[in-house]
Amino acid sequence: MKLVAVVLNWNGGEDVLRALDSLAGTETVCVDNDSTDGSDARVERRFPRVELVRTGVNLGFAGGNNVGIRRALARGADWILLLNNDAVAEPRLAEALERAAAARPDAGILACKVLFEDGATVQYAGASFNAALGYSGRRTGYGQADRYHDLRDVDRADGAAMALSSKLVERVGMLDEELHLYVEDVELSLRARAAGFAVVFVPDAVVRHKGSSSTGGSASTTNMYYSTRNTIAVVERHRPLPRGLRGARRVVVTGTHLAQAVMHPRRAEAASAVLRGWRDARRGRLGQRSSR
């Protein structure tokens, strides 16, 4: 099995250097998504064996990672590991993925275990997704001590760290660039499962993840907009409903996000971002959010 890692750099600073350090010994492509903090030059100097691809424009999470996926496939990858630039791979992650791929030849996506930076508290150990309701269930183990050690099927992977098989990409395609940011991992998981591939949680493929650094951290409302808009767009594509039920589902998705906005440090801005996401989803406006 040939594994090629892809790290997408968005003004990653020291984080992206740590991510690449953690992948030592794994063939790696770093896609610089139009960073402006000089981190691309630091990557180039420090990691001469890492292929650095500069996009010259912000392509979003999906578009930037797709550049890396294409390069990985051109290098002959059987599996492509997507690792966020604010995540660090624990030792022997590549070996864990190889074992899982051998044990589960039906897998199209291998979902890594994602821990918070402390290395002990779970951020992701599997997750459910109800397309009929548009509800992405709370991630398994979130905020708890790590006690998840079984290889098992899950509804969806987490984009912070997931490996895609070349067979999956050939059959169903890459990440959906219309979404730009957020929910791409859910959407690809839905396509994978619809095509007969399994999404498999790999408990000994472990990463530590800071989270939200590419979109401004916990104070940003960017995630509220894209999560609302893209959740609506994805469920309407994958689980269409009659007009009345479709409207009710939009209310459920928007209401769930508004409930999250109440807890946001910038409550009014977060609520406005949610409502704008709802409006753009209704109008079919996808891609990068404009300033309108």
Image: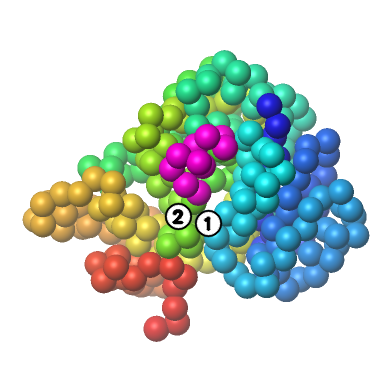
C-beta proximity under 8 Å, tags 2 and 1? yes
The circle drawn on residue 257 is none
Quadrant where the C terminus lies? bottom left
Q: Nearer the viewer, residue 271 or 72?
A: 72
Q: Is residue 16 magenta?
A: no
Mark 2: which amino acid?
A: Asp
Report which residue position mark 1 lands on: 62
* Quadrant of res 257: bottom left
Q: Which residue is pictured at 55% across the width and 31% down the height? A: 110
Left or right placement of residue 152 versus residue 79 in this view: left
* Quadrant of res 207: top right
For residue 161, above or below residue 276: above
Instruction: Tell me if I can see residue 84 in this picture.
Output: no
Report which residue position mark 2 lands on: 176
* Quadrant of res 267: bottom left
Q: Which residue is pictured at 52% across the width and 34% down the height? A: 167
Give the residues drawn in magenta, as a range.
165-174
Mark 1: which amino acid?
A: Ala
Which badge, 2 or 1, is on the more N-terminal residue? 1
